[in-house]
Image: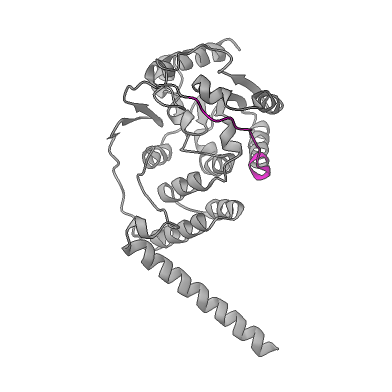
């Protein structure tokens, strides 16, 4: 029996080492099309590398923005600076509460905000978090929080990408990257905002959908809210403006509002400001710069009227 256990342990050890070696060779030498379960892209879409490089030396802020691409494309740090607020935008593509929690563990104390504006898009609570986890793994230094995130998400693509990323870091294979400020239609602005080249959305009918909360996403969200309460940081939850067809696709939007209102001060800007789908958005989700300016001015007005 002891010999069987020993042989089993040795086999598992050998299999694990073999898997890690093959995984890294596969990830290093083969093109992305041949490695769908390894997605390690430094400096990829959304300027996450630039954002996470800048935040490490940014210092304390008045306002911290959190959330998905609606955040880093929706809160213009320059507009807030004009009003005397130092801000940082820590949004990321498809960011779910699981990734928000990881980023806060790393950077909240460094930024020490007086106010946090957390953009809460319904889809963020229903996503599995894989896409956003890959973004963070590739563009930030990995630690125990990355490992915890991978186990919560429990997806082979996240596991493989993390193993590959950790190996690259251990072997010093990641040279410092200077990411272009302008990449196609996107321009990175200091403080984490990404300005999109002016575009205009042509509204279209979108299939109806029910908002569903993943238990582990709601748990992470609750823990984030508790962290802010413990630290005495004011929190405002914001449902950022989206085109009317996208907003109206959700069959239980009022339910989502009621859940968010139970956590903190909450503003649904889809019910508070009137924007034109064609003039103020560049696609079915994101504000163009005209829309950003209207939205941000309203946010600042609310902040200053508290």
The residue under the point 70% across, 28% down is: 259
Which colour scheme appears in the figure?
one colour
Depth order, front residue of 200/107: 200
The residue under the point 56% across, 82% down is: 10
Q: Position of residue 161 (x, y in %)?
A: 45, 57
Q: Quadrant of residue 250?
A: top right
Does 20 sit left or right of 155 as displayed?
A: left
Depth order, front residue of 51/290: 290
Q: Quadrant of residue 127?
A: top right
| Quadrant of the frame with the C terminus | top right
Most prominent secondary structure in the magenta stretch? Answer: loop
**Residue 56 lies in the magenta stretch:** no
Q: Quadrant of residue 86?
A: top left
Q: Position of residue 165 (x, y in %)?
A: 43, 57
Does 140 sit left or right of 197 as displayed?
A: right
Above/below status of 300 relative to 189: above
| Quadrant of the frame with the N terminus | bottom right
Q: What span is in magenta?
A: 205-218
User: How many labels, in total?
Assistant: 0
**Residue 207 lies in the magenta stretch:** yes
Q: Position of residue 246 (x, y in %)?
A: 52, 25
Above/below status of 36 relative to 189: below
Above/below status of 208 relative to 128: above
The residue under the point 66% across, 84% down is: 5
Above/below status of 217 relative to 204: below
Depth order, front residue of 84/38: 38
Does 9 sit left or right of 274 as displayed?
A: right
Q: Position of residue 68 (x, y in %)?
A: 50, 34
Depth order, front residue of 174/149: 149
Does 73 sit left or right of 224 as displayed?
A: left
């Amino acid at each position: 029996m002891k010999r069987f256990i020993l042989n089993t342990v040795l086999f598992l050890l050998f299999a694990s080492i073999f898997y890690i070696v093959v995984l890294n060779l596969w990830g290093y030498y083969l093109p992305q099309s041949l490695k769908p379960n390894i997605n390690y892209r430094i400096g990829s879409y959304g300027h996450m590398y630039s954002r996470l490089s800048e935040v490490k030396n940014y210092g304390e802020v008045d306002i911290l923005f959190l959330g998905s691409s609606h955040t880093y494309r929706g809160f213009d740090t320059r507009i807030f600076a004009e009003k005397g607020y130092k801000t940082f935008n820590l949004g990321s593509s498809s960011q779910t509460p699981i990734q928000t929690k990881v980023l806060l563990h790393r950077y909240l104390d460094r930024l020490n905000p007086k106010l946090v504006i957390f953009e809460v898009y319904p889809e963020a609570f229903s996503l599995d978090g894989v896409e956003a986890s890959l973004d963070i793994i590739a563009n930030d230094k990995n630690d125990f929080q990355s490992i915890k995130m991978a186990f919560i998400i429990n997806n082979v693509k996240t596991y493989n990408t993390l193993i590959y990323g950790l190996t690259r870091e251990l072997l010093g294979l990641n040279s410092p990257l200077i990411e272009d400020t302008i990449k196609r239609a996107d321009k990175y602005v200091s403080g984490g905002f990404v300005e999109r080249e002016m575009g205009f959305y042509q509204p279209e009918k979108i299939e109806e959908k029910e908002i569903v909360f993943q238990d582990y996403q709601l748990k992470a969200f609750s823990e984030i809210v508790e962290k802010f309460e413990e630290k005495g940081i004011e929190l405002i939850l914001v449902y950022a403006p989206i085109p009317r067809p996208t907003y109206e696709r959700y069959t239980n939007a009022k339910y989502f509002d009621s859940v968010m209102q139970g956590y903190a001060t909450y503003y649904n800007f889809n019910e508070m400001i009137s924007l034109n789908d064609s003039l103020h958005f560049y696609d079915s989700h994101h504000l163009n710069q005209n829309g950003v300016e209207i939205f941000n001015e309203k946010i600042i007005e609310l902040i200053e009227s508290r």
